[in-house]
Image (cartoon, helix red, strand yellow):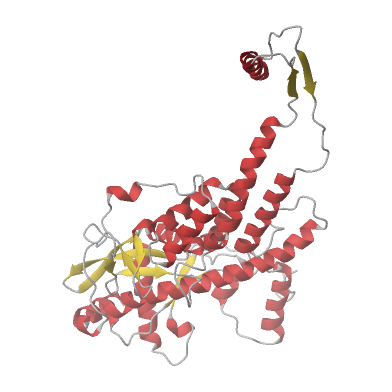
Amino acid sequence: MRFMQRLVHAIRPSAGATSPRPGQLIRTLPEDSWRDYPADGITPSRMASILRSADAGALDETMQLYEQMEEKDAHLFSVANTRRLGLTGLDWQVISASEVREGVDRSMADEAAAFCREQLTRLECFDEVLQHLALALGRNIALAELVWESQRSGPVLVDIVPVEFTRIALGELDEPRILTKQEPLKGVALPPNKFIVHTPHSTSGHPSRGGLLRVSALAFLGKQFALKDWLVFGEVFGMPVRIARYEPSATPQEKRELLDMLQSLGSDAAGIFSKAVELEFAEPKVNAGPSPYESICNFLNREMSKAWLGQTLTVETVGQSSAFAAADVHDRVRRDLLEDDIRKEGRTLRRDLLRPLSQLGFGRDVPVPFFRRKLEAPRDMRELVDVLSTAVNRLGLKVPQRWAHDVLGIPEPGDAEDVLEATDASSPVA
């Protein structure tokens, strides 16, 4: 098999895809670690200006804003991580095109899938690249560079390098471009077979729109104002108001001194006043109801949860009746979002990674394999055993033994490994 791979790779390099540029195009610059912190003291007009600049193609400030939004909002960070980890926490696999589509050359399809699987397994950085691409769920765009090495047999993939988000720009036709030291404003076009471009929420429309962080921007902004007012309120809430009454004949100098003493009384809890000064402490009324700022923050948190997870009860169950049953239903809604994320990730990696890998090694006519995540539906094991027993013993269906081991979670025994023997082969397993 491997001999045939090397042979085909050696005799058909010109019949494959466009030969990619060898080496690494995007070099790390000191400026990549610089940040402007646009979310500090942000206002509605300032946020609108940043988002409009992204629509015009300048994404660097918007990407810095998105990064800071997750840093400053713990709830947003939580739901964003939950959405991303639901995808990246699953094992990945490369599936032969013969298992998905009919009428393809099974031998060549299986060989191409095995070749791609071997290449990706060899890359130690591949899982980190997948985590980087998952950030596109919020930012709506993520890039990674394919680093090829020219060898006698043809181009060989040796590394995949994530591209810093502040290095991404959009051209006049909304196509992704890369900012370099030579082209720091307009950037350079992406060479063929050199970049993975993941835009999960932009099957049509502008690449800077549609990301979940952009959808969360208004809720983030409102929550920042509510938190600021809440902290100011919490600082003075419960503190008695200090009132000093002076004689009408008091001079401006005496009034200023009296004010200074009241202010020092708040921090030092001690003061000296004339007998002519009437001092009063006005205790605030205690409000037993919830703070309006807390209600605003909770409302905006729920809005973020809906945007990212499609529901709220797997995140917050405080004050909810029948929380467990409702959360179970809502978790199934979140599974629909996960399946959609898996489809979009697989489509991107098949187009930008598996296709050049396959075609550069086997030619343009090779059936391109598929990238999938292993997402198993929750099963009742006892019910599954009954179904298998009925299918095999009563209906006579041919069930692949490897598949049965996988779905039951039972590993296949080794050649010299002891196995359990059935005590009564005629009775079904209970």
Is there any visible trace of residue 406 in the rendered image?
Answer: no
Is 348 above or below relative to 28? below
Quadrant in the rendering for residue 107: bottom left
Q: How far from the left and from the top, in percent, is residue 24?
A: 24, 61
Q: How far from the left and from the top, in percent, is residue 277?
A: 75, 12
**Is residue 224 left or right of 427 when viewed as pictured?**
left
Which residue is at a point 74% across and 25% down the rendered structure image?
241
Quadrant in the rendering for residue 62: bottom left
Is 166 above or below relative to 114? above
**Is residue 191 left or right of 374 when viewed as pictured?**
left
Of residues 358 and 238, the one nearer the viewer is: 238
Which residue is at a point 70% across and 50% down the rendered structure image?
296
Report the quarter where the N terminus lies.
Answer: bottom left
Q: How many marks?
A: 0
Of residues 332 and 410, the one nearer the viewer is: 332
Report the quarter where the C terminus lies.
Answer: bottom right
Is there any visible trace of residue 219 in the rendered image?
Answer: yes
Which residue is at a point 32% across and 67% down the rendered structure image?
177
**Is residue 169 left or right of 98 when viewed as pictured?**
left
Which residue is at a point 61% across and 47% down the rendered structure image?
225
The residue furthest front is 249
Of residues 349 and 306, the one nearer the viewer is: 306
Q: How far from the left and from the top, in percent, is residue 274?
A: 72, 7
Is 280 above or below relative to 63? above
Q: How far from the left and from the top, in percent, is residue 144?
A: 36, 63
The residue furthest bottom is 103
